[in-house]
């Protein structure tokens, strides 16, 4: 079941010594506030390096000097440029500290911030994963039916946890699904995530979700939406796993919607209740097209009747009729994926001399909803800055570990400090095509 290669890694161990401090200070980006290092030869230190870019930051693979483990360090630069972006970062930090689920990325640590006058960047440490689903899909690595089922089960399992906390991810795509060589998967990048809005009269941000994975209601200018937008994205990824290519790949949002109707057929007027008037008018002007679902069976030999049956329930134009995460997890197609995951991959079950013991609830929900009331009275960038600075200080003080900070003497520091959002193609589109 392995999908990515592993490497032999030799790590730093803990001990005090000036020679080691000298070596580490010139090699590692991370340093501890009270450094205690072991003497390690320079050639044994794995170099720090960038491993990915997101909408709001860059991620590096670095070594935690406290225990020698490799971790992911996410840098969020220029956090306090405007109120919208600073509130989003504040929300993401709070979410990363809130999450406690095997298939959802969470914060292991947050670097100690400087004095608030110099507080401009935030550094979050998370578990280091070896690859992501996009790289696996485009690689020559063969994917079996077991791979697809295990990946899809974990995506839905993590998403059920998020939705049970009333959180919409709003950017589910293969690049935001991190994977290890043992096929364990974690949902990451919550820069666009938010709590569901129960009041349908309140408008929500439309410029969310990377275009290829955007749901029809978003493409048609819906002012309000719910967790079904994430389920559409999962359906697109499911098809991509089966066929090893993007299902709906268009140049513009309107062309994206036309590709969807080419496959699923022209939607009924009642199925476009969430669309804006301009989008409904455009769709009704187009020649009628019947569904062409046979295309899904031709994705690959992995597209069995059960697989296509589940996929068709995810790829439904009307979000009110789209399958929920909970119902998708109950589909027979995922029975084998669930069994394989809980037989040898998860940490929620345990093994004794009498055999493997399974937990009673395979898809746990959040203990309580994520509370976003902290955002309600944030009316200025300075307010957000003060609140976030205090939250991080309080959080680092509660770890009972030596705090971490950036080492400006590191050989890689110059490259790391200049890292910004270098890939604008990763940003979600912001179309206003129906106005």
Image (cartoon, rainbow, N blue to C red):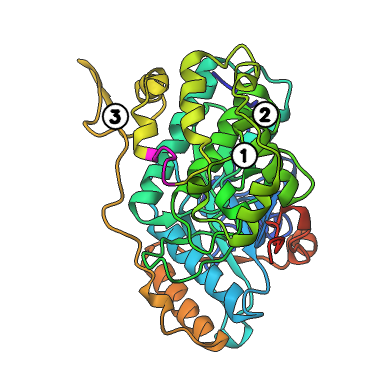
In which quarter of the view is residue 122 placed? bottom right
Give the residue at mark 3: 349
| Residue 6 seen anywhere in this rendered image of the structure | no
Q: CA distance from mark 3 to mark 1?
A: 27 Å
Which mark identifies residue 326? none
* Residue at horizontal 45 percent and vertical 34 percent from the top: 154
Q: Secondary structure at mark 3?
A: loop
Residue 162: say if magenta.
no
| Quadrant where the image shows the N terminus | top right
- Residue in the foreground of this view, choosing between 324 and 15: 324
Residue 156, horizontal then vertical, whole percent: 43, 37
Please give the residue where the numbered disc 1 appears in the rendered image.
174
At x 53%, y 21%, the residue is 147
Segment tinted magenta in the rendering: 320-325
Closer to the eye: label 3 or 1: 1
Secondary structure state at the residue bearing disc 2: helix
The reply, left or right, for residue 346 in relation to residue 263 is left
Q: Position of residue 410 (x, y in %)?
A: 73, 61
Majority SS type along the magenta span = loop
Q: Is residue 91 visible?
A: yes
């Amino acid at each position: 079941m392995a999908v990515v290669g592993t490497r032999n890694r030799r790590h730093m161990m803990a001990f005090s010594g000036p020679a080691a401090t000298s070596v580490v200070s010139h090699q590692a980006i991370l340093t501890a506030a009270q450094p205690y290092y072991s003497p390690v030869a320079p050639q044994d230190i794995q170099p720090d390096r960038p491993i990915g870019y997101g909408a709001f930051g860059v991620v590096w693979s670095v070594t935690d000097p406290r225990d020698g483990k490799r971790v992911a360090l996410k840098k969020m630069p220029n956090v306090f440029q405007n109120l919208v972006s600073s509130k989003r970062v504040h929300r993401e930090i709070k979410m990363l500290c809130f999450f406690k689920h095997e298939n959802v990325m969470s914060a292991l640590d947050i670097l100690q911030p400087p004095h608030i006058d110099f507080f401009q960047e935030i550094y979050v440490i998370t578990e280091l994963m070896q690859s992501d689903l996009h790289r696996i899909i485009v690689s020559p690595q063969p994917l079996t039916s077991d791979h697809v089922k295990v990946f899809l089960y974990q995506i839905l399992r993590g998403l059920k946890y998020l939705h049970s906390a009333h959180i919409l991810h709003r950017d589910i795509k293969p690049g935001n699904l991190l994977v290890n060589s043992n096929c364990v998967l974690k949902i990451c990048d919550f820069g666009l995530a938010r709590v569901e809005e129960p009041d349908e009269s309140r408008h929500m941000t439309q410029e969310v979700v990377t275009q290829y994975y955007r749901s029809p209601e978003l493409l048609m200018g819906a002012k309000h939406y719910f967790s079904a937008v994430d389920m559409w994205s999962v359906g697109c990824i499911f098809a991509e796993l089966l066929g090893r290519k993007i299902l709906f790949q268009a140049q513009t949002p309107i062309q994206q919607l036309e590709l969807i109707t080419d496959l699923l057929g022209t939607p009924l007027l009642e199925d476009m209740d969430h669309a804006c008037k301009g989008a409904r008018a455009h769709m009704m002007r187009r020649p009628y097209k019947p569904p062409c679902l046979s295309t899904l069976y031709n994705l690959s030999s992995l597209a069995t009747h059960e697989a296509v049956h589940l996929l068709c329930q995810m790829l439904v134009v009307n979000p009110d009729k789209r399958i929920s995460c909970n119902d998708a997890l109950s589909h027979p197609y995922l029975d084998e994926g669930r069994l394989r995951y809980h037989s040898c991959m998860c940490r929620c079950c345990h093994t004794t001399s009498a055999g493997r013991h399974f937990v009673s609830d395979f898809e746990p929900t959040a203990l309580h909803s994520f509370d976003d009331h902290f955002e309600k009275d944030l009316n200025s960038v300075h307010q957000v800055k003060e609140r976030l600075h205090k939250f991080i200080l309080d959080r680092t003080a509660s770890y009972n570990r030596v705090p971490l900070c950036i080492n400006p003497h590191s050989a890689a520091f110059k490259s790391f400090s200049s890292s910004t959002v270098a890939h604008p193609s990763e940003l979600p589109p912001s179309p206003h095509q129906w106005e």
